[in-house]
Image (cartoon, rainbow, N blue to C red):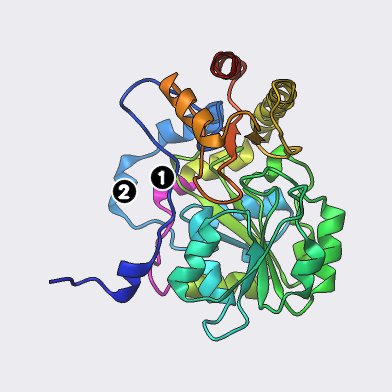
Amino acid sequence: MDFLSKKARGIVPYTAGEQLRDRTYIKLNTNENPYPPAPGVKAALAAFDAGELRLYPRPNADLLRQAIAEKEGVEPENVFCGNGSDEVLALSFPAFFDADGAGACFADLTYSFYEVFAAFFGIPVKIVPLLPDFTFDLAAMRDAHCQGYYIANPNAPTGVGIPREKMEQFVASVPDKIVILDEAYMDFYGESCVPLTKKYENVLVVKTFSKSYSLAGIRCGYAVGASSLIAGLMRMKDCYNSYPVDAVAQTVCTAAVKDTAYYEAATKKVVAERERLQTSLRAMGFTVPESASNFLFAGRAAADGKTVYQSLRAEGVLVRFWDKPLLRDFVRITVGTPEQNDVLLEKLKKILS
């Protein structure tokens, strides 16, 4: 007998990047930071009292919210913390969109979890194609009949960014619609749109500790926005889990937020390697949109994405490939250390020769 619901039988889940353990790989497929967490994080983890684990964590992560608020220049009431930015994004769907409403609008080539979340919560979607140069068609998005928008900035998997000035023009043009800005990769780009949350009540900025903070294994993310938006997320959280961010994550992420100098230096190293790798890939004949993230979206007419992906995997290098329209001609390559990137380029030359 099948006990699954119609939703469980019919929904298509998100597919995460491979986490293979069958051999030693150079892992450039899931946009993890190639550099370790800050010394302050290591010290906080070493000093953590295991006896605290018998107690439930602070339900609203108050100390972490305070630390984030100080970093972002807002008040704690403007910050929401969740179990990874994916959970924050997931909660935003039922918080700001209705199943019988006009729906959520996002690009055809963007973070694929948006579509999964919409299906899970029964939210209609409006898909707007990217322009031929992989930039967002903000004019078409503005004109779309919807309740609001999801915009990954920089975008994933293309890596293309939108300057804050242009983003503000868009936000100002849709005052009656919520604009959710997924800034998972913003630290590798430039100016965050967090300041816009003080000026526009329809802006919610979502960030993560997984990328620039080198804490993908801890699972913590946050949102910044008007207190009314944060209250909506809190209501959704408390409908299914009052304690989403565990005590260890709260301690570690609070330490990370305070160790800005280390992370700024590490981010600069990633950006420098991104530029070097981008130049090298283009010299090898790859088409690579200008990246504002910690990864590169690379395609080559002489070799389809699947061939490049499979050949690199056989050589011990993992990159990301999607066998889907618009994506199958490309692979997404996470920027690694100089040594890792050198191996990648060496293997590519061998494969393409």
Q: Residue at x 48, y 73 (%)?
A: 236
The image shows residue 188 at horizontal and vertical percentages of: 70, 38
Horizontal placement of 25 versus 276: left or right?
Answer: left
Q: Secondary structure at mark 2?
A: helix
Check disc 1 and give the amino acid type: Val
Magenta-highlighted residues? 237-250
Magenta span dominant secondary structure: loop
Mark with earlier residue (1, 2) = 2
Q: Which residue is mark 2?
A: 53
Quadrant containing the C terminus is top right
Q: Is residue 326 visible?
A: yes
Horizontal placement of 311 versus 147: left or right?
Answer: left
Q: Secondary structure at mark 1?
A: helix
Q: Is residue 241 magenta?
A: yes
Above/below status of 199 relative to 268: below
Above/below status of 55 relative to 313: below
Q: Residue at x 78, y 71 (%)?
A: 142
The image shows residue 259 at horizontal and vertical percentages of: 62, 35
Q: Is residue 127 magenta?
A: no
Q: Which residue occupies the foreground of this view, 232 or 250?
A: 232
Quadrant containing the N terminus is bottom left
Q: Which mark is residue 239?
A: none
Cα distance between the residues tagged 1 and 2: 8 Å
Above/below status of 319 relative to 234: above
* Quarter of image, res 263: top right
Task: Tell me, yes or no, whether the two marked residues, 1 and 2, touch with CB atoms within 8 Å.
Answer: yes
* Quarter of image, res 294: top right
Check disc 2 and give the amino acid type: Leu
